[in-house]
Image: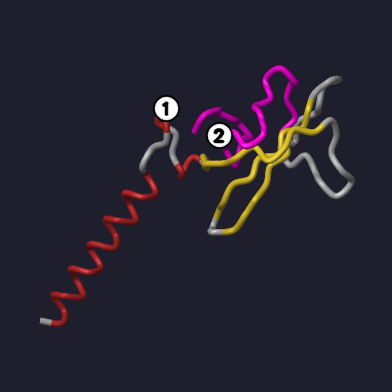
Amino acid sequence: MQLIKTSILLVAAASLTACASSAPYSGGRTWDEGWRQGVIESVNDALKWYQSASCNRVAAPGDKFVVVSYRASNKPRWKFIPMSAKDAPAPKSKVLVNANTCELVPNA
């Protein structure tokens, strides 16, 4: 009887984990592909000395640095994404950010 209960619990846990990891965000974007829900913390003219443009993008003249906060492995993370001033979302906007490619999709 104990073996049956343990088996049922393991199957239930596995199915819940599979659903959570593959559930798509808007546009079919998934956690497994690197997409995370985030919030625009600030839009800055330049990076401070202790920040790095972790997106490996070169900022063009006049670009702003968008600071996006998100959670990964239950820890806070940040991306510093250079983009044109006209495309930069407003602070406190909810977004989807790809932790691998630094793509940003507004209104998550």
Quadrant of residue 88 in the image? Answer: top right
Can you name the residue that lies furthest to the bottom here? 2
Query: Is 87 situated above or below 69?
Result: above
Distance from disc 1 to disc 2, alpha carbons, whole Å, reads: 13 Å
The quarter of the rendered structure image containing the N terminus is: bottom left
Image coords of residue 79 (percent x, y): 68, 42
The kind of residue on which mark 2 rests is: Val
Can you name the residue that lies furthest to the left here? 1
Quadrant of residue 84 in the image? Answer: top right
Figure label count: 2
Image coords of residue 31 (percent x, y): 46, 44
Taking the spot 25% from the left edge, 68% from the top edge, the residue there is 10
Left or right of 61? Residue 15 is left
Left or right of 17? Residue 88 is right
Query: Is 103 situated above or below 74?
Result: above
Taking the spot 42% from the left edge, 36% from the top edge, the residue there is 25
- Residue 26 inside the magenta-drawn segment: no
Label 2 crowd (10 A; few <14 / some 14-19 / many >=20): many
Q: Are marks 1 and 2 in contact (CB under 8 Å)?
A: no
- Residue 101 inside the magenta-drawn segment: yes
Taking the spot 64% from the left edge, 35% from the top edge, the residue there is 102
Query: Is 9 situated above or below 18?
Result: below
Closest to the observer, 2 or 45: 45
- Residue behind mark 1: 27
Left or right of 68? Residue 95 is left
Image coords of residue 23 (percent x, y): 36, 42
Taking the spot 55% from the left edge, 28% from the top edge, the residue there is 105
Segment tinted magenta in the rendering: 81-108
Say the numbered circle drawn on residue 95. 2
Closest to the observer, 102 or 48: 48
